[in-house]
Amino acid sequence: MSYELIATLMFSSMMLMLLTGQRVFGAIGFIAVIAALLLWGDKGGFDIGFSAAMKLMKWYPLLTLPMFIFMGYVLSESKIADDLYKMFHVWMGGLRGGLAIGTIGLMVLISAMNGLSVAGMAIGSTIALPELLKRGYDKRMVTGVIQAGSSLGILVPPSVVLVLYAMIARQPVGQLWLAGVIPGLMMASLFIIYIIVRCRINPTLGPVLPFEERDIPRAEKLRLLRAGLLPVGIFAVMMVPFVNGWTSLVESSAIGAIAAFAAAVLKGRMTREVFENSVRNTLGITCMFMWIILAALAFGAVFDGLGAVKAIESLFTDRLNLSPWTILILMQLSFILMGTFLDDTAMLVIVAPLYVPLVGELGFDLIWYGILYTITTQIAYMTPPFGYNLFLMRAMAPPEISLRDIYSSITPFVLIMVFALILVMAFPGIATWLPDYVYNKP
């Protein structure tokens, strides 16, 4: 049996197991172990799994994962994140679509606190959505705003997905996070511009708040501003030393976790329940990602041993005579297709052993490609019929918002994301300038 056929059987078997509802790490790890044992026997097969485990345990930047997740859960469980929306409510309610714009700002800051899109979706659905609907905002527009804004969680640092990509692609986490800053802010700005233009054309979509709701004392406004900007201060305390080279990435993540914990204690919100929930959720998500990374490393090691990447490169470039850019675009389209029934981590783990080495062989920058992957995943999250965010929103939305409303709400935001993806592909410096500046400055 040829190595190409073995690689095809591995990939198809893994997809079959996923379609039966198996957990991602279980399906991928099982196929990797069985293939290794059949190909190289007891000694070689066990060595591959053991080597992957040791590589994972020795990867020092992985310590950032529980730190950032803990920071996000502390800020969320202690309701410090709620203060953000109160601030936006008061300070931006006088604008047409101001609360929707504030919701995008809320999502950006939640992303900077947590690094997971599901956190932004949960907070947006429980805090922002009821308030927007109560104040007469168009249900389709605000549903799209929350879905689009929450997707920024996997792009704006500290993105947990980029940590996973860094491990599989063997790229520095810090550079990937910095590469996501400008594209993430650019996409958020495009969302805000769309909201402003749309509400100017049709003011009924995002009405101005009544004067009595905005007529509060200046001292109260300033108090809300201070409370709302606390998470921004925590993020600055964490990231400024790292960007200036005073601390390592792991040290900065520890600073962020300690700062969030201290803020919750000083505000009197660090109860036993908040602490237990934060630790329990942090442990669960961290362990899940470690199992996924371990399975991906083992699967990738088998593929490397088979030479599957070289075979695929030869198929595309020699037999089919496709250009590197054509191959790259086909990869992005396949992500969108897989995103209709898989989440971001599953997509990355499934195709990373094939795509990431191939992208490097084609001469593309792997830091830049990590941002392309992430933006494409955001698009896939919101693509019908089975986009991940669509069903999360359906589960969290009130009964008056139908699945049809959810589907129709995302069209303009998906088009904005596609435009952002094209910009990053056409101008790689959007993603690569900041990490180059920080890491290569004298």
Image (cartoon, rainbow, N blue to C red):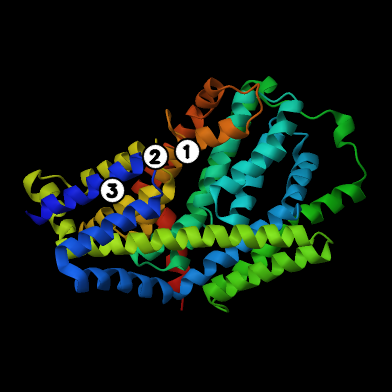
Q: In the rendered structure, find residue 14 and report the number of the disc placed on it.
A: 3
Q: Which residue is mark 2?
A: 339
In the rendering, at what x and y percent does residue 111 appear?
A: 59, 52
The amino acid on which the numbered mark 3 sits, given as a three-letter code, is Met
Residue drawn at (30%, 40%) of the image: 334
Q: Quadrant of residue 332?
A: top left
Helix, strand or loop at disc 3?
Answer: helix
Report whether 110 appears left or right of 426. Answer: right
Residue drawn at (47%, 72%) of the image: 61
In the rendering, at what x and y percent does residue 36 appear?
A: 21, 63
Q: Which residue is mark 1?
A: 388
Identify which residue, 441 or 420, lies in the foreground. Answer: 420
The amino acid on which the numbered mark 2 sits, given as a three-letter code, is Gly
Residue drawn at (46%, 75%) of the image: 60
Q: Are marks 2 and 1 in contact (CB under 8 Å)?
A: yes
The amino acid on which the numbered mark 1 sits, given as a three-letter code, is Tyr
